[in-house]
Image (cartoon, rainbow, N blue to C red):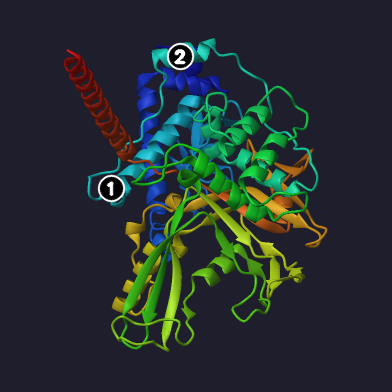
Amino acid sequence: MASEFETDLTSCPHLAVIFSDENTKTILLDTYRKVATWRVQRSQIAANSAKRRKISFPACRTCSTTMLKPFVCIRCSYLACWHDEHIKDHLDESGHVLCLDVSSGNVYCRDCGDFVYDSNAHRTNIAAFVAAEERSTFFQEARTGSREPFRTWTAAEKEVVALEAASPVPCQARRGLLNLGQTCFMNVILQSFLANPLLRNYFLSDKHNHKLCKAADCTCCELDIVFSEVYSRNPGPYGPASFLATTWRSTELSGYSQQDAHEFFISTLNQIHSTSRGSTAFQCICIIHSTFAGMLQSQVKCERCGNVTTATDPMLDISLELKDKGGSAVGTEMTLLSCLRRYTQPEKLGPNQYSCDKCGKASHEASKRLSILKLPPVLSFQFKRFEHKSGDKSAAHKIEAPVRFPATINMAPFTTLFMKSKERQSDEHGSTDAASFSHLGPETNYEYDLFCVVCHEGQMDNGHYTCFARSHDEWYRYDDDKVTHTSLGECLNSQAYMCFYVKRRLEYKPNTTPSYKIAREAEAIKEKEREREKEAARMREVEDALLATV
């Protein structure tokens, strides 16, 4: 059923003509598929840059220069460079109109003299790229066959009717939050929730409605109210007083004193988890665990006998030290990547810290190493800037050292799968330079984009929290009720306390009925059987009582 929600958008009439003609449309689709296959093959090996270089960049057919950003003519597949405008020369000489940026999939129109957008071209580019990834990521569903193919969402007739009946609400989704008395720690965490795309989609799709929930002191309801207020017509600052009151009643972080933003973040996650749906005896699939939950693996190796003991622990965030194991500041410039390398590097255990099961006695030679067994959709990092010595808060101080962090990060080198592959290749070849890590899959499985940064300004006793958050690819700075437009560069130069990254490509599983639904349906059937048995027993008691009176 056609509707206004399926209208094609285009800024170029020449590109629209191509999609209206079946022959030229077929040529365009074939070009997109070839380009997408090359891009996936280029980025297939996330860990091995040496082997990736074997898939060389193409050369310009005009000047024979190797192109880091190649362009291809959509009509005849002519490859040329953009820097010397050889692709433009080809379009002028051949009379062809459109060319394609191989790196991004963007389309340039000669007649328009600019890069143009077309919703059909955009969908074709994404579909071709995802299809090429699906063909290469066979490892994800090794037991059940190939990876589940991606299907674009198409509104059913019932959904179209509901969308047409809905009235759009104009909002910017950028509202400052009033400081209710040293509550800047709460405001920055709420802004990080509002900028989180998974939480935003969950609450705006009415997965938890505060008007229908009957639970008392429900933190999930309070967050739903915050989303409703921020995405309302009112552009003025909002005071989350009911959220703060619920937090006071539900946690130990009550009172008018300044609190730690990270402690409030973890406490709020636990409260939302306990008041949201999705927790079962099999696994928790609530919105918090679906968004933040990952898995850490701890590996302890006995240096005497080589015995390896592994253990796994759930994680909601990663706390990174800004000092080395001896407690002294790191001499080199600190970055998020260097902190992660220090977090995952082997650590020598002290005497009597580890007892080897194989040796049967305490080992004085053992090493421990952490790695990420399962990456969550949203990664939260905390830099340990506040130090408390011997539990004495008066002796606490803040580490002011700057930490550089990137706008995008590849987490492949810190995963358990990568580390095992690296150790295996090192044992077999003595080097990892020529190792093959093709089973790790495309780089997009490990790439994360920055969307929020929480900053702490000042000292511990008189500090203040602010944050940067991304909204529609624009960056804004939130200082309680004040919201100002800023840039990514300003964000990256800030003194970060917490960083939030979202996965660039979310994983999806085969279209099967979730185990929790099966368990819920089975439990409902058993509950009905128990009710029938109780009713039958009650009827027998009534009949026996009647017979006794007779």
Identify the residue at horizontal 42%, vertical 69% (top origin): 298
From this view, report whether residue 86 is shown above or below residue 343. Answer: above
Q: How packed is label 2: few (under 14 Cα within 10 Å), some, or many (20 or more)?
A: some
Which one is in front, 17 or 452?
A: 452
- Which label number is shown at residue 160? 2
Occupied quadrant, residue 532: top left
Which one is in front, 105 or 263?
A: 263
Residue type at tag 2: Val
Q: How packed is label 1: few (under 14 Cα within 10 Å), some, or many (20 or more)?
A: few
Which one is in front, 415 or 359?
A: 359
Identify the residue at horizontal 36%, vertical 35% (top origin): 150
- Which label number is shown at residue 56? none
- Marks 1 and 2, how far apart at CA: 34 Å
Quarter of the picture holding the N terminus: top left
**Residue 71 location (% of width, % of height):** 49, 42
Label whose residue precedes the other's in the sequence (1 or 2): 1
Residue type at tag 1: Glu
Which one is in front, 29 or 381?
A: 381
Horizontal placement of 344 versus 385: left or right? left
In what element is the residue under mark 2? helix
User: Is residue 510 visible from the viewing direction of this image?
Assistant: no
- Mark 1 touches mark 2? (CB < 8 Å): no
Quarter of the picture holding the C terminus: top left
User: Is residue 51 visible from the viewing direction of this image?
Assistant: yes
From this view, report whether residue 176 is shown above or below residue 455. Answer: above
**Residue 6 location (% of width, % of height):** 47, 18
**Residue 308 location (% of width, % of height):** 33, 76
From this view, report whether residue 22 is shown above or below residue 394. Answer: above
Identify the residue at horizontal 60%, vertical 26% (top origin): 112
Horizontal placement of 17 versus 536: left or right? right
Q: Which residue is mark 1?
A: 141
